[in-house]
Image (cartoon, rainbow, N blue to C red):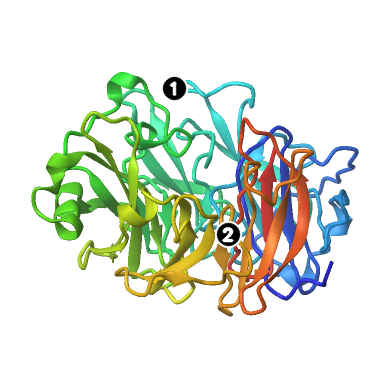
């Protein structure tokens, strides 16, 4: 196995025993949760002063994970806090300074949640080893937890909750150091990297599209779309004022990318919403349930942050008809990438990219197949991803690799090999802001 190049990443999704790993490839830093046979130290409550990533000695408080000889050092950072998961592969659970890690602690892992079940928002101080519960929340689900994520500073942490009297979900902005918080009018799916806005689809309706990504409420409180309604779509919340507005309704989105009359093809829902690194453009996974069908057809749409300039980046004939998954923004904020069977459904997955308006759709490399949840490093050369148990690079014993791909050379390095479980579909990765740390959540 070759030494990994400098970039690394940060990943999340549950399986049976939870690992939360943080790895820095070039200087070799990393961390994991629930590793077994570990010892953990406790320390004083976190202080406002952050020592910075390079100054943190993880060996002081966290045991190493050494199974399958990782290519980088890996530490178990939640050995006494089970069932902890971070969010999706496009945001990092590590705070902007590098000192703190924020996760959702699920209340159980042997059944699906019911409305009103409470999870916890947990802060891990990587400098002291302390684990602290910041809040309880009923606004979570099994894939992405409570959407816990950082804003622009260590004083800005966001997550979702729900008012169980009305079953109306809302976002929360918290200062975990000063221990203050306030309620937002809208929900949080992804924070803009500049911290000024949060984008979200309707997290109650999302469960109609795919379970695990939204908020669990009683069925009678879940709106059902018909066609492409103009009162549902992409919502943006101002994190300073807390005000939320619908910047693009589904009726307008469908008309812009598919033409007038396309709303009669079936029922549309908004799914994943993601800001680009420049915070000026949003991607939306638009799903159509054709009339009489329960199988959704996915396509990728992008728009400016104010909901204007709506473009079709990956059309349904390329995605839904051929097969693919997990789009993400490229670091330049003008291109998108994903796994796609570009040459047809019978072919394997390839890493592909296209401009935000669908131009120049092409493979990034055909020397190495795609898989899992890919993220591209700002150098434009290195991709980090995982794989599902059903993908060909998974091992027969139920473990999966975290892959560091050099698209210029057409090579890959196995960074870490970790156990997974079919019921939870394995890990998923995401690059931290410093592009030097990788967090992995497994169960």
Q: Is 253 drawn above or below residue 435 in the view shown?
A: above
Q: Earlier in the sequence, mark 2 or mark 1?
A: 1
Residue tagged 2: 370
Name the residue nearer the viewer: 303 or 53: 303
Assign the C terminus to one quadrant of the image.
Answer: top right
Left or right of 93, for residue 144? left
Estimate the x, y position of residue 184 in percent, counting from the top left. Answer: 35, 47
Estimate the x, y position of residue 187 in percent, counting from the top left. Answer: 36, 45
Left or right of 374, for residue 309? left
Secondary structure of residue under mark 2: loop
Residue extending farthest front? 346
Left or right of 222, for residue 335? right
Q: Would you identify the image quadrant in which residue 362 lies? A: bottom left
Residue tagged 1: 115
Which residue does the image show at 34% across and 27% down from the upper left?
A: 167
Which residue does the image show at 20% across and 48% down from the upper left?
A: 250
């Amino acid at each position: 196995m070759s030494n990994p190049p400098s970039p690394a990443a940060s990943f999340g999704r549950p399986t049976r025993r939870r690992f939360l790993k943080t790895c820095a490839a070039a200087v070799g830093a990393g961390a994991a949760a629930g590793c077994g046979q570990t010892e953990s130290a406790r320390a004083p409550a976190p202080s406002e002063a952050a020592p910075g990533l390079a100054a943190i000695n993880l060996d002081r408080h966290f045991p190493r994970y050494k199974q399958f000889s990782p290519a980088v050092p890996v530490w178990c950072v939640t050995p006494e806090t089970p069932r902890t998961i971070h969010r999706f592969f496009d945001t990092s659970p590590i705070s902007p300074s590098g000192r703190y890690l924020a996760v959702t602690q699920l209340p159980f892992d042997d059944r699906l949640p019911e409305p009103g079940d409470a999870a916890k928002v947990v802060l891990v101080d990587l400098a002291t080893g302390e684990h602290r519960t910041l809040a309880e929340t009923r606004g979570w689900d099994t894939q992405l937890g409570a959407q816990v994520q950082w804003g622009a500073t260590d004083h800005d942490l966001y997550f979702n909750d729900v008012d169980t009297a009305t079953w109306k979900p809302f976002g929360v902005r918290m200062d975990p150091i000063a221990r203050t918080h306030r309620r937002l009018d809208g929900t949080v799916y992804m924070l803009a990297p500049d911290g000024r806005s949060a984008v979200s689809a309707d997290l109650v309706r999302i469960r109609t599209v795919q379970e695990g990504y939204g908020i669990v409420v009683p069925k009678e409180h879940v709106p059902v779309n018909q066609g492409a309604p103009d009162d549902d779509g992409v919502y943006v919340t101002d994190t300073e004022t807390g005000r939320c507005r619908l910047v693009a309704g589904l009726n307008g989105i469908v008309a812009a990318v598919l033409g007038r009359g396309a709303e009669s093809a079936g029922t549309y829902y908004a799914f994943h919403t993601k800001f680009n690194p420049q915070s000026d453009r949003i991607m939306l996974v638009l799903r159509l349930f054709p009339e009489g069908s329960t199988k959704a057809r996915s396509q990728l749409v992008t728009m400016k942050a104010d909901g204007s300039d709506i473009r079709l980046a990956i059309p349904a004939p390329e995605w839904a008809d051929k097969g693919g998954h997990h789009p993400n923004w490229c670091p330049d904020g003008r291109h998108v990438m994903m796994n796609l069977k570009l040459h047809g459904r019978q072919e394997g997955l390839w890493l592909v990219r296209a401009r935000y308006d669908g131009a120049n759709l092409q493979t990034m490399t055909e020397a190495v197949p795609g898989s899992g949840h890919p993220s591209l490093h700002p150098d434009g050369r290195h991709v980090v991803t995982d794989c599902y148990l059903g993908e060909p690079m998974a091992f027969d014993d139920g473990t999966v690799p975290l892959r560091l791909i050099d698209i210029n050379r057409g090579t890959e390095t196995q960074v870490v090999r970790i156990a997974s479980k079919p019921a939870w579909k394995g890990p998923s990765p995401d690059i931290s802001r410093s592009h030097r740390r990788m967090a992995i959540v497994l169960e």
